[in-house]
Image (spheres, rainbow, N blue to C red):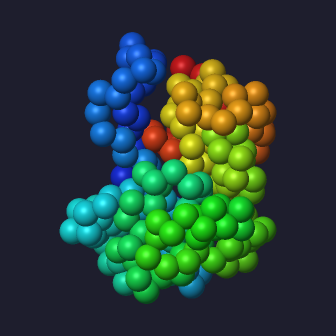
Amino acid sequence: KQWDVITIGNLSRNRYWGESDDKGVRSTLCTTTLITGDGFRILVDPSLADAAQMKHELDRRTGVKPRDVTAVFITHEHPDHYEGIAHFPDARWLAAPAVAEILNKSGKLPRVLEGCADQLFDAVEVIPTPGHTHAHHSLVFDCAGLRIVVAGDSAITQDFFRDRSGYRNAVDFELSTRTIDKLAAMADIIIPGHDNFFLADYVG
């Protein structure tokens, strides 16, 4: 029915702003998105470690309370993408099977993630988007006649997407480029991992 960006992420260092890849200049924040449909609310990549702040941003952007979130989905295994997951104890905790396996073995979460492949709630497609990490997965859904991709760090910001470039910590830069090409061919709107959403064909 709708989607809302809860937090607009940023990078610790951004080469497009003239910053070196060698040293961080700010704290990292990932983009968090809420997808709402018939019988579900999926929060993707909860970004805020502080419970009160996470609750405030969710309410400020949507009026939704943490207890109203049906499921939390984690795109990949980097910690900034699951900082706030513990604030949603009533939700299902989901990830693609490969991501769930990595994080469950790590012992970094207070409970296990469920591995989910193909679709969530018969409405949101789970697709492999490797390059940033090998296990990375994104979500795809249709809303108001548009195809939306919640890309996580497979498309880290609009600048990196436009240049078909992976971020400095990508495990495979050639694969990152192929994944971005794949997303550009399928999406109308990209919700990236560390930026605001943008039109997939925007080149300005």
Q: Residue furthest top?
A: 18
- Where's residue 140, x and y in %? 68, 57
- Where's residue 138, x and y in %? 65, 54
Residue sitting nearer the eye, 97 or 161: 97
Can residue 97 be seen here? The reply is yes
Q: Residue at x 44, y 76 (%)?
A: 110
Q: Which of the 4 image quadrants contains residue 176?
A: top right
As drawn, is 34 to the left or to the right of 186? left
Can residue 34 be seen here? The reply is no
Residue sitting nearer the eye, 150 or 198: 150
Give the mark count: 0
Q: Quadrant of the N terminus?
A: bottom right
Q: Residue at x 32, y 78 (%)?
A: 65
Above-or-below relation of 92 to 14: below
Q: Residue at x 74, y 57 (%)?
A: 127
As drawn, is 175 to the left or to the right of 138? right
Q: Which of the 4 image quadrants contains residue 17?
A: top left
Q: Residue furthest front?
A: 106
Q: Quadrant of the C terminus?
A: top right
Above-or-below relation of 171 to 44: above
As drawn, is 26 to the left or to the right of 113? left
- Where's residue 85, x and y in %? 42, 69
Q: Residue at x 59, y 55 (%)?
A: 76
- Where's residue 2, x and y in %? 52, 65
Residue sitting nearer the eye, 100 or 69: 100
